[in-house]
C-alpha cells in the first residue's frame, strides 16, 4: 500500500547506457514530480506533470525525458548516461493545490561508472 | 520565488525542545509555509504547513509572526530518531501545478543522547 513507489531502488550502470526509472502513485494525486538530489544534498526539481501534461521543465539536459502514460505514473528515461548523472532521484506527487504537501518516494540511487 | 534561509546545522539533546527558524523576507501574500523532514536514504516527508499565527499537529508546531517574514518549527522533546534534515519551503501551493516547490539546503539536526 506504498503511496509513491519507485523502481529500482539502486541502479549501477556504465557511461553511455540508457536507463529508466519508474514511478507510480496510488494517492489519486493530479501532479507528479521528479527531483534530483546530488552529493551535497541539494534537492532540485527537474520536471512537474499535471494530469499527464508537462508543467515545469527546469534546466535539465534533453537526455532526460519524462513520460507520463497516465496520471498515476511518471517515468524518467535517461539517455547516454554520464558520470555527473550519479545522484539520488526522487519522485513525488501532490494534489494540484498542494496544500497538503508533497508525498515523496524513497528514491533511486543512480551510480554511473 | 520567495527565498528561504535556515541554519545549516543544529545540535540538541534528547528530551529538549528544538526550534528551527526559517527566514523568508520576500514572502508573497498567497504563499504558504511548509516544513519537511528527510532521513538518510529516504525522501522528504511532510511535517506541517501554515499561513499565519500558530499551527500544531501531533509531530510539531509552527509559529508564524504577523509579518510572516519568518517561521519557526518547534519539535517538543526530541529523541534520537528526530536526527534528520529539516527543510522550509515557501510558495503559492494553490497556484495549481505552476508552483515550483524549491528546497534549500535545509537544517541538519543532530540529536545527542
Image (cartoon, helix red, strand yellow):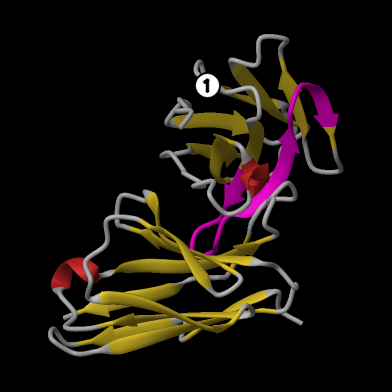
Magenta segment includes B39: yes
Residue at x 64% of width, y 56% of height: A102
Residue at x 61% of width, y 37% of height: B92
In the image, residue A19 lies at what x, y percent? 30, 88
**Number of numbered discs overlaid on the protein picture:** 1
Closer to the camera in the image, A112 or A34: A34
User: What is the chain identity of the residue bearing mark 1?
Assistant: B
Give the residue at the far front of this rendering.
A53
Judged from the image, the secondary structure of the residue bearing numbered disc 1 is loop
Left or right: where does residue B69 sit relative to residue A76?
A: right
Q: In which quarter of the image is residue A23?
A: bottom right
Per the rendered image, the range of residues in magenta is B36-55
Residue at x 57% of width, y 70% of height: A105
Q: Is the magenta stretch mostly helix, strand or loop?
A: strand
Left or right: where does residue A80 sit relative to residue B93?
A: left
Image height of A90 relative to A52, above or below: above
In the image, residue A101 lies at what x, y percent? 68, 51
Q: In which quarter of the image is residue A11?
A: bottom left
Residue at x 21% of width, y 78% of height: A112
Closer to the camera in the image, A68 or A79: A68
Residue annotated with mark 1 = B24
| Residue B113 in view in this figure | no
In the image, residue B49 lies at what x, y percent? 73, 38
Q: Residues within 10 Å of mark 1 (few under 14, many from 20)?
A: many
Closer to the camera in the image, B82 or A78: A78
Which quadrant does the C terminus of chain B fall into? top right
| Residue B100 in view in this figure | yes
Closer to the camera in the image, B33 or A10: B33
Q: In which quarter of the image is residue A109?
A: bottom left
Amino acid at each position: 500500500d506504498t503511496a509513491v513507489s519507485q523502481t529500482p531502488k539502486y541502479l549501477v550502470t556504465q557511461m553511455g547506457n540508457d536507463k529508466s526509472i519508474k514511478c507510480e502513485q496510488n494517492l489519486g494525486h493530479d501532479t507528479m514530480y521528479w527531483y534530483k538530489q546530488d552529493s551535497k544534498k541539494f534537492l532540485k526539481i527537474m520536471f512537474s506533470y499535471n494530469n499527464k501534461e508537462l508543467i515545469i521543465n527546469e534546466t535539465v539536459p534533453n537526455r532526460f525525458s519524462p513520460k507520463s502514460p497516465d496520471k498515476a505514473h511518471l517515468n524518467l528515461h535517461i539517455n547516454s548516461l554520464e558520470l555527473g548523472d550519479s545522484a539520488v532521484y526522487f519522485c513525488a506527487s501532490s494534489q494540484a493545490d498542494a496544500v497538503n504537501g508533497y508525498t515523496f518516494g524513497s528514491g533511486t540511487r543512480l551510480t554511473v561508472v | 520565488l520567495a527565498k528561504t534561509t535556515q541554519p545549516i546545522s543544529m545540535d540538541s539533546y534528547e528530551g529538549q525542545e528544538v526550534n528551527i527558524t526559517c527566514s523568508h523576507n520576500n514572502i508573497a501574500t498567497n504563499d504558504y509555509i511548509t516544513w519537511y523532514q528527510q532521513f538518510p536514504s529516504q525522501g522528504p516527508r511532510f511535517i506541517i504547513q501554515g499561513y499565519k499565527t500558530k499551527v500544531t499537529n501531533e509531530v510539531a508546531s509552527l509559529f508564524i509572526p504577523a509579518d510572516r517574514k519568518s517561521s519557526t518549527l518547534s519539535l517538543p522533546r526530541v529523541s534520537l530518531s528526530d536526527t534528520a534534515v529539516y527543510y522550509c519551503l515557501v510558495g503559492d501551493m494553490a497556484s495549481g501545478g505552476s508552483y515550483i516547490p524549491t528546497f534549500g539546503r535545509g537544517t541538519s539536526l543532530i540529536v545527542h543522547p
